Amino acid sequence: MTKPSIPINLLQQPEQGARCIFTPFLFATRAAQVVFDDLALEQSKGDFQVPQAVWVDNRLNAQPLTLQFLGLPIILQVRAGRQGIYPIVSTTGITRWTAASAQTAVDVPAAMFNISIPTWWQDV
């Protein structure tokens, strides 16, 4: 059986140019352990197409953060007290994701990029 392959946008410039959208995970603000969010408004206005990378600053969180993109088999786990840039492999416009953490006393800064960010996939 042949394994399927998919085209990816590695190092290609999107139509709207390189963009970054700040999307903090507001656990403390919403008093929740799971936060749902999306890019539907930005995508409908043509400001942002396909997320290619995400930056997460989990330094002030005493618990790991789990980030899952709905509709994709991608689950990112950011260790407690760490930050980093993580690649997102997708050919479709991701519109929804969930962020989860056992800690609800902090908001976690994050940003989505519509371009690939060269990284060693190592958090700091």
Image: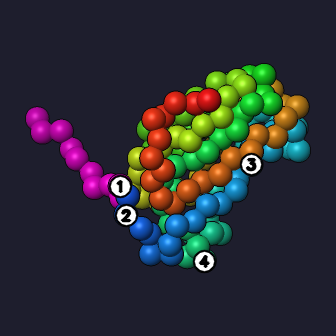
| Residue corresponding to mark 2 | 12
Q: Is residue 45 visible?
A: yes
Judged left or right of residue 40, residue 87 is: left
Tags 4 and 3 touching, CB below 8 Å: no
Q: Is residue 9 magenta?
A: yes
**How many other residues sit within 10 Å of disc 2, few (<14), some (14-19) or many (≥20)?**
few
The residue sitting at 69% across, 47% down in the picture is: 110
> Residue 121: x, y in percent?
48, 34
Number of the front mark, 1 or 4? 1
Magenta: main secondary structure equals: loop
SS type, badge 1: loop
Alpha carbon distance from label 1 to label 2 = 6 Å
| Residue under pointer 4 | 45
Q: Is residue 54 above or below residue 41?
A: above
- Give the spatial CA distance, label 2 vs label 3: 26 Å
Q: Earlier in the sequence, mark 4 or mark 2?
A: 2
Cβ–Cβ under 8 Å for marks 1 and 2:
yes
Residue 71 visible to the viewer = no
Using the numbered discs, state the Cα–Cα distance from disc 4 to disc 3 in whole angstroms: 20 Å
Numbered disc 2: secondary structure: loop
Q: Amino acid at mark 2?
A: Gln
